[in-house]
Image (cartoon, grey):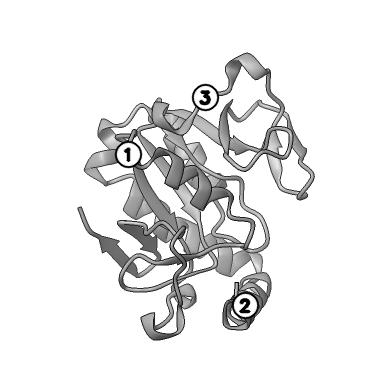
Amino acid sequence: MNLNKKAIRSYIRSLRQSLNYSEQYKSAQLITNKIINLDCIHKATHIGIYISFDGEIYTDLLIKFLLSMKKKIYIPVLLHKQQHLLFAPYTLSTPTIQNYLNVYEPKYNIIDLISLDKLDIIFIPLVAFDDHGNRLGMGGGFYDKTLQYQKHKSHCIYIGLGHDFQKIPTSILTQEKWDVKLPKIITPSYLHWHT
């Protein structure tokens, strides 16, 4: 990772963290309204989605809508500090705990965990992105490693979620060989939808 990525990450994270509840909720409403009308959502059964952290797009509203649509929801978990994410089932009554990165995840039984290839859709958080679907994450590489590992095996649709201000010019977002592009990204007023 170069200083440019560090600077971008620091700047965008500070913008995310400065949003108040009203701004966050409005963004969540706009994104949720877009998502629940997507054809791929209506066809999907098993959906992976994150619990919001560090100013990311609030996912609570979307999770409630998806559950009301009878979708099965799964949240990423970090198992024994491994690099690949696994997913634990989640409902509104599932208790959550903070993992070693202070991110909330469901309490789970090992036997209930599923891998990415069992999911129809996964919503992915991002710090920044560009018009080509390049994504800058938090720097841990968990999603990149998971998507890289699964990209030749899975029918899963990857959809990035972000705020409008997280879109940046392609010229300043350098990519590494292990970075995985997102064919689909949604913000309150932007839709990047390559098939």
Kindly indicate the quadrant of the structure image that contains residue 75.
Answer: top right
Q: CA distance from mark 2 to mark 3?
A: 34 Å
Looking at the image, which is closer to me, 50 or 33?
50
Q: Is residue 52 left or right of residue 61?
A: right
Q: CA distance from mark 1 to mark 3?
A: 17 Å
Kindly indicate the quadrant of the structure image that contains residue 81.
Answer: top right
Task: Kindly state the secondary structure of the residue where label 1 is placed.
Answer: loop
Amino acid type at circle 1 is His
Query: Label 2 belongs to which residue?
Result: 15
Q: Residues within 10 Å of mark 3 (few under 14, many from 20)?
A: some
Q: CA distance from mark 1 to mark 2?
A: 35 Å
Return the x and y of residue 36 as percentages of the image width and height.
Answer: 33, 44
First in sequence: mark 1 vs mark 2: 2
Please give the label number shown on residue 152.
1
Task: Kindly state the secondary structure of the residue where label 3 is placed.
Answer: loop
Return the x and y of residue 149 as percentages of the image width and height.
Answer: 45, 41
Residue 107 versus residue 24 in the image, above or below? above
Query: Label 3 belongs to which residue?
Result: 114
Q: Residues within 10 Å of mark 2 (few under 14, many from 20)?
A: few
Return the x and y of residue 89 as percentages of the image width and height.
Answer: 56, 25
